[in-house]
Amino acid sequence: MGPNNPVFPVTSAASALPWAGQPYSIKRHGVSITNCDTEPVQTPGCVQARGALLVLRHPALTIAQASENCAAVLGHDAAELLQQPVSRVLGAAGAERLAEVLASDAVECNPVYLFSQTGAGGALLDAVVHTLNGSVMLEFEPSVPTAAAASGSRLPQGEAGLYAVLKFAMARLQTAVGLQAFCDVLTQQVREMTGLDRVMVYKFHPDLHGEVIAEASREDLPSWLGLHYPADDIPLPAREIFKRVWVRPVPDVSGALAEMVPLVHPDTGVPVEMTHCGLRGPSVMYTEYLRNMGVTACLTMPIRSDAELWGLIACHHYAGEKALSFQQRTACELIAQVASVQFRDAEKREQLQSEVERERVSQTLLARAAGSGSLASVVRGEISLKDVLPCSGAALWDDGRWHCVGQTPPLPQLAALAAWLSTRPEFDNPLQRLFASDCLSADFPAAVAYAELASGLLAVPLGPRPGGLMMWFRPQVLQEIRWGGNPHDKPKVVGPHGPRLTPRVSFEIFAESVRGRSSPWLSHEKEAATRLRLLAMELVVVRAQRLATLNDALTRSNDDLDAFAHVASHDLKEPLRGIHKYAHQLREDARIVDEDLRRKLDNLLSLTVRMDGLIDALLLFSRVGRESLELEECDFNAILDEALEMVGSRREETHSEIVVPRPFGRVRCDWVRCREILVNLLSNALKYNDKSPKRIEIGWIGANETPRESAPKEAAGQTVYYVRDNGIGIEARNQEQVFRMFKRLHKRDAFGGGSGAGLTIVRKLVERHRGAIWLESELGSGSTFYFTIPGASGGAA
Ligand code: ADP
């Protein structure tokens, strides 16, 4: 069986307080507690019966309340003590000493040792005093001889020994490097000072759930190091008390309770507050819980950061009652205070170290990206984007592609996530353009599908949306940690409060509270991501500028080329016509009888015809580049009909089947040019096809439908048209080539010949419409040419 929460029990649902209307006493009402968050632990109305408490009026020092066990501890009946001067118990000299201490020492909320005196049956008692809200709280508890207190610990005997150990402990804490080392030293030193069987540092995570991060224990005990417990395990009142006291001893978990007489202060009518009393009666729920775990004595100290509770030093003993002397407890208090001040330094030192490390990783990545000219390089190599933050995987969307490292959701899901992110208002926040979630499925329900590997997401945009994106993922907490209870255990211990005190329920509550959650993103981690974003943006901007310059140059040279093609083709046409004419005349000249010469003239003639064709193609191409488009709302179905009619003769020549799976919608385009695109693609589909029947499908993929993986980024979110054939196909290595001017993949006359300009012109036409064209093909099985025309809508026209 896994251990229960080492510190506090699990709570259950709230219910009406059974003691409503009457003052609370744990002795009377504690067993009916059903919700630890409402238990008045600061006013329990009872003390641990091993000692006695007197509540005195100040400055009269008369006894207003006394614990019911005064007879057994002090030898005076409680009822008899009420309204009496304190000298009845302390004697005249003792009362005088008390008055002196109250006058001179800072005892408000601060218990100090007064003296030891003999109590009932000759037992030696330590008297400890503090004031609170105008009352004097005088506690008596059995003196613990230092030798007895030291049993089990490696403490040298006597007070001097205690100070020596304390001094040594402080020195070791001050020199510990890093939080872990610090907490290890802390548990070892506290165990050494107290001799308790198990000493743990229990750290609260930002969502308030706890984890045992350091432990020093008897060698034969199983380790609880690394166990996690749900936030609900530590009731709120207990957390509040630890913001106010430095040590909480329960030396006998099974010890009896003694109620205050009367239960409320007779002058004020309110229950006395025992927050600072060492004898404060512990919650029944709490002691029963500890007993279930076999704990016989315990001691707890807070570790605070500013006024907040950062964690606890929780100590358990399993071998019977274990009281510590007042001096030992004071030493523990001191250690807790020192730890509270110093653990932050240790943590800061560690944080600083990791920040330096993170900065180094970021610099390395960016230097690499700048060197290679590609941001994508940040996901490659031993040090990658994944090392910038503690995470299980990272993804980068750049230049129309995903680059992933470590564990990330699959690509289609990443794309959907990115599309959703691009609509997030967080990306508009000028102070920190960043989206962070430790429960992604709550923000983006589709993320449920991959909650195990990515419940946490931190994302930053690179440039204006829907541009680049950097993302880091964290797995669900359930994937990373060990439990404080085995989920398969049946409830083993059923106490008066039912089976909720078992690890099984504890686990289930915990599992429920962390399902779909990752560990949270801390502010310095967000800052690191933001910093990396700014640095990466610089690179993106530089790259964009370089691209813009190149684009300018390219546009200029394209314009020049179009102008040149136009002039050249025009000017070439004239002499070519002349050559053709003279060759023809020569060929027809009856005087030429030489067969060889005739054949050569035939060749010359067909070459001129061919050249004329090429020049026409060039002229057409230059016109496509130069002439403005006449954009209008068109019915794509009608354009297709015309195009099919124009390739009709070729269709009739061959046995072919044309399929249009569903009607097209409308499109804003240049009718004639758009028809030209279709005519070209259709005639190629018929021409480069050796199948019978030739099957051609013309269709569209809606903007909301799953896009083709081959689609370029410009096609994202657009209606995609396609022309698919079952023809000869195109080898992968030639697929880009087919769009080049005068590029043919076959002998000139194979498949009916062609100039090799058709697809070049088609591409130019598509690009003039600001669309994109690409293809998928397999040699022997057929090709599909895809293209987009922005402004196209799917569905019926
Ligand atoms: P052409 O005018 O010669 O048909 P294109 O520019 O239209 O020139 O096409 C270039 C080359 O691409 C063709 O020569 C052919 O080899 C190849 N091609 C074009 N379309 C197809 C297709 N649907 N199936 C197979 N190959 C094709």
Image: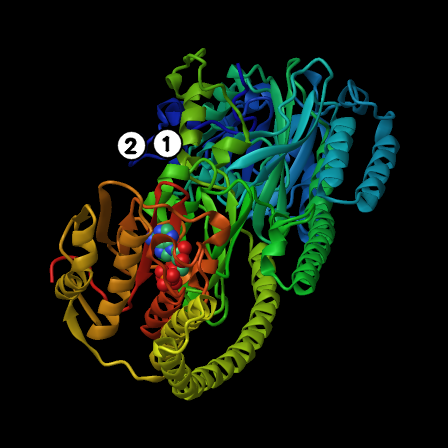
Query: Marks 2 and 1, how far apart in space?
Result: 7 Å
Q: Is residue 368 above or below residue 140?
A: below
| Residue 135 appearing in the image | no
Name the residue nearer the viewer: 483 or 424: 424
Horizontal side of 356 relative to 41 (left or right) equals right
Give x and y (percent) for residue 362: 66, 58
Element under disc 2:
loop
Q: Is mark 1 within 8 Å of ligand 1?
A: no
Quarter of the render that holds ligand 1: bottom left
Q: What type is the residue that disc 2 sits on?
A: Ser
- Residue 331 location, quadrant: top right
Horizontal side of 351 relative to 269 (left or right) equals right
Discs 2, 1 touching: Cβ within 8 Å: yes
Give x and y (percent) for residue 227: 57, 28
Q: Specify the label residue 593 is tagged with.
A: none
Residue placed under numbered mark 1 in the picture: 35
Q: Mark 1: few, some, or many residues within 10 Å (few <14, many ≥20)?
A: some
Q: Is mark 2 within 8 Å of ligand 1?
A: no
Residue placed under numbered mark 2 in the picture: 15
Give x and y (percent) for residue 144: 73, 23
- Residue 607 location, quadrant: bottom left
Figure quadrant of the C terminus = bottom left
Name the residue nearer the viewer: 19 or 32: 32
Q: Mark 2 vs mark 1: which is more N-terminal? A: 2
Which residue appears at 77% of the width and 18% of the height?
152
Name the residue nearer the viewer: 750 or 720: 750
Q: Is residue 221 above or below residue 575?
A: above
Which residue appears at 73% of the width and 42% of the height?
334
